[in-house]
Image: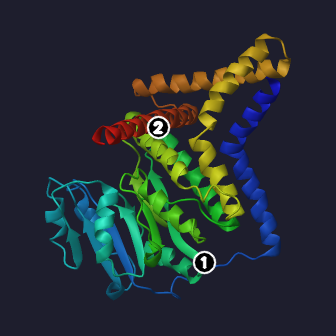
């Protein structure tokens, strides 16, 4: 019991903090032997296609269009494609007001991945930049992304996601903002060590020739597109100076729904990215992938429950004062999270409670995401067998 407790506790610590400490040490050792390469933004100017998938975004789509066409990059080298499949409002109509934009529209909505697949044959750029309709890029975003392609080993470049958090933000907003700041730091260090592990759909780019179609039922398409390129031996770079600004989720309910979807997609991607998890192909990349993604999306939430139960048993059995103190610390942490939950319901904002509350929301989302994925897979299998 004691061995299981300490191994589980170590894995939890490693997942959320230890991996960051390991990266911190490794990149400083690497700097002793190899200088960090600094790329200039104006050296490489390939043709670029900016691809935006929008669904019923009429309220902000014109702002997105203006933000996109005003990005700093030679206009003769940029192609803009907006896909509005399934939109039932005036999204497509409002985009068509602007010259120089290709609008692809179908009345049927088949999902984002299907929309992207439909747009691929129309792409003319050497580099394809994906960005969401509800995010806004800094003017230098394209220049900052493109510069990394001076390295022929780079197959994709991820931008940074920034959450706009107001002073009056609720727990979901403040917690999400803190989470993405920490994530951005890990991504910088991942890339400096070897490669980033995935990309967020808010802003990322790929060498167009390296694009591989992913399954139409893919839940987190951006992550899968980038990871399939990495599985072929290319590096996923990370550029924090190219960023997408996005407002935080409206409330905890919305944020939880998004997290459950991502967690379900994470489980799905782990089952499909077998090469990425095989250390015999690219050992450093596999180490990063398992440390940064796989542990979070699989065993860690279960270990939190296991550690709590084992700690209670050890404390009540009188295994030592240390176990009692650890158990009290866990109780205090979860009480803070529970208090944060009730304060959120009452619209009372106490920032010290945001982090434990958001931490618990994140890990609950993984458990719920796993249940959602298993149910969906079971339903799909039953439907398939029924048709035979």
The answer to whether 193 appears left or right of 147 in the picture is right
Residue 185 locus on image (x, y percent): 62, 57
Residue sitting farthest toward the front: 388
Q: Nearer the viewer, residue 152 or 55?
A: 152
- Above or below, comparing residue 145 to residue 203 in the picture: below
Compared to 337, does 29 lie above or below? below
Task: Give the vertical position of 253 relative to 178 (above or below).
Answer: above
Task: Give the image location of residue 318, x and y in percent.
Answer: 83, 12
Tell me which residue sits at (32%, 39%) in the image: 383
- Badge 1 is on which residue? 153
Residue, x 70% and y 26% (percent of image)?
307
Q: Quadrant of residue 328?
A: top right
Whether residues under marks 2 and 1 lie with C-beta atoms below 8 angstroms apart, the answer is no
N-terminal label among 2 and 1: 1
Q: How is the image coloured?
A: rainbow
Q: Residue furthest right?
A: 320
Q: Secondary structure at mark 1?
A: loop
Point 40% across, 53% down: residue: 218
């Amino acid at each position: 019991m004691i061995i299981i407790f300490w191994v589980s506790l170590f894995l939890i610590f490693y997942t959320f903090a230890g991996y960051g400490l390991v990266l911190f040490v490794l990149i400083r050792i690497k700097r002793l032997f190899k200088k960090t390469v600094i790329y200039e933004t104006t050296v490489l100017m390939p043709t670029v296609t900016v691809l935006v998938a929008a669904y019923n975004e009429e309220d902000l789509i014109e702002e997105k269009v203006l933000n996109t066409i005003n990005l700093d990059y030679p206009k003769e080298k940029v192609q803009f494609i907006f896909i509005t499949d399934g939109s039932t409002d005036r999204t497509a109509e409002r985009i068509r007001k602007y010259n120089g934009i290709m609008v692809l529209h179908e009345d049927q909505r088949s999902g984002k991945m299907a929309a992207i697949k439909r747009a691929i044959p129309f792409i003319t750029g050497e580099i394809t930049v994906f960005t969401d309709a509800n995010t806004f890029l800094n003017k230098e975003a394209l220049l900052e992304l493109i510069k990394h392609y001076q390295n022929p080993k780079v197959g994709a470049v991820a931008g940074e996601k920034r959450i706009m958090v107001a002073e009056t933000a609720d727990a979901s907003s403040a917690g999400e903002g803190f989470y993405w700041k920490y994530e951005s730091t890990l991504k910088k260090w991942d890339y400096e060590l070897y490669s980033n592990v995935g990309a967020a759909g808010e802003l990322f780019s790929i060498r167009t020739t390296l694009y591989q179609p992913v399954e139409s039922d893919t839940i987190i398409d951006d992550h899968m597109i980038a990871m399939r390129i990495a599985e072929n031996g290319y590096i996923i770079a990370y550029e924090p100076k190219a960023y997408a600004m996005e407002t935080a989720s409206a409330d905890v309910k919305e944020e939880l729904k998004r997290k459950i979807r991502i967690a379900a997609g994470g489980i799905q991607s782990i089952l499909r990215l077998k090469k990425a998890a095989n250390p015999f192909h690219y050992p450093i990349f596999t180490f990063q992938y398992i440390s940064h993604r796989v542990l979070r999306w699989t065993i860690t939430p279960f270990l939190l429950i296991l550690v709590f139960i084992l700690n209670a048993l050890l404390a009540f059995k009188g295994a030592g004062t240390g176990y009692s103190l650890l158990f009290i610390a866990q109780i205090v942490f979860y009480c803070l999270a529970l208090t944060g939950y009730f304060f959120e319901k009452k619209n009372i904002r106490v920032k010290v409670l945001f982090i434990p509350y958001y931490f618990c929301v994140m890990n609950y989302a993984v458990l719920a995401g796993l249940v959602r994925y298993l149910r969906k897979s079971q339903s799909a299998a039953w439907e398939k067998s029924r048709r035979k």
